[in-house]
Amino acid sequence: MGTIMEELLRQHRDAEAMLVKLAAGVGRVQREGASGAGVLDDLGDLRREIHGEVLSHFREEEQALFPVLGRHIDSASGPIAMLMEEHAIFRQLELQFEEAVAALEAGFRDGWEEKVCDAADSIARLLPAHIEKEESVLFPMAEDVLSADEWEHVRRLWREALAAVLPA
Ligand SMILES: [Fe+2]
């Protein structure tokens, strides 16, 4: 792993690549329906990617970067609170997406194609602006105020956040 900041930015680029795949997946649902060849496989891959990578990125921010940055800036209001709130909204959308994909996989069609598209559209609206806020406001702030020791602390918390979810 490079610096924490490099890793966070890399994860953001991965999230943007995921959004491109998500748009393609939704386009296929709209054109071919969930019964189109490979459409459900694509949705299943997207679900795993969103659940695995995006949620683990949020955990790393929430459990490593935000607490250390919260010593310098108020975390009950301002950018940290706003970003946490957006993470919570995203988690709801992610659940809706998962639920709709599961329903389609189980063979239900009644309204679920629309729901999977709605959840994906909401994710696609939220995430780019969220990433932009972090990269234009929060990350520069972190670069400004955190000392080398504090970055080391972020790195330690990050490892702990990973260890809590990954099998040893
Ligand atoms: Fe982020």
Image (tube, rainbow, N blue to C red):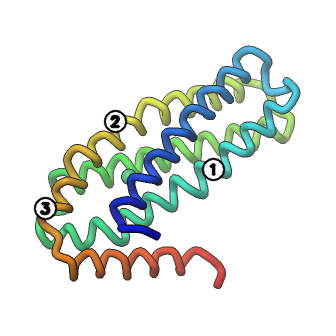
Would you call the spot at circle 3 few (<14 residues within 10 Å), some (14-19), or many (20 or more)?
few
Q: Check the image and report above or below for 132 versus 5.
A: above
Would you call the spot at circle 2 few (<14 residues within 10 Å), some (14-19), or many (20 or more)?
few
Q: Position of residue 27 (x, y in %)?
A: 66, 20
Q: Single out the residue that lies furthest toward the front.
A: 2
Foreground pick, 126 / 13 = 13
Residue 61 disc label: none
Q: What residue type is disc 1 on?
A: Glu
Residue 129 disc label: 2
Q: Position of residue 12 (x, y in %)?
A: 43, 48
Label 3–label 2 contact, CB within 8 A? no
Q: Residue at x 78, y 21 (%)?
A: 33
Q: Secondary structure at mark 3?
A: helix
Residue at the disc numbered 1 = 49
Q: Residue at x 65, y 80 (%)?
A: 167
Q: Single out the residue that lies furthest toward the bottom.
A: 168
Residue at the disc numbered 3 = 144
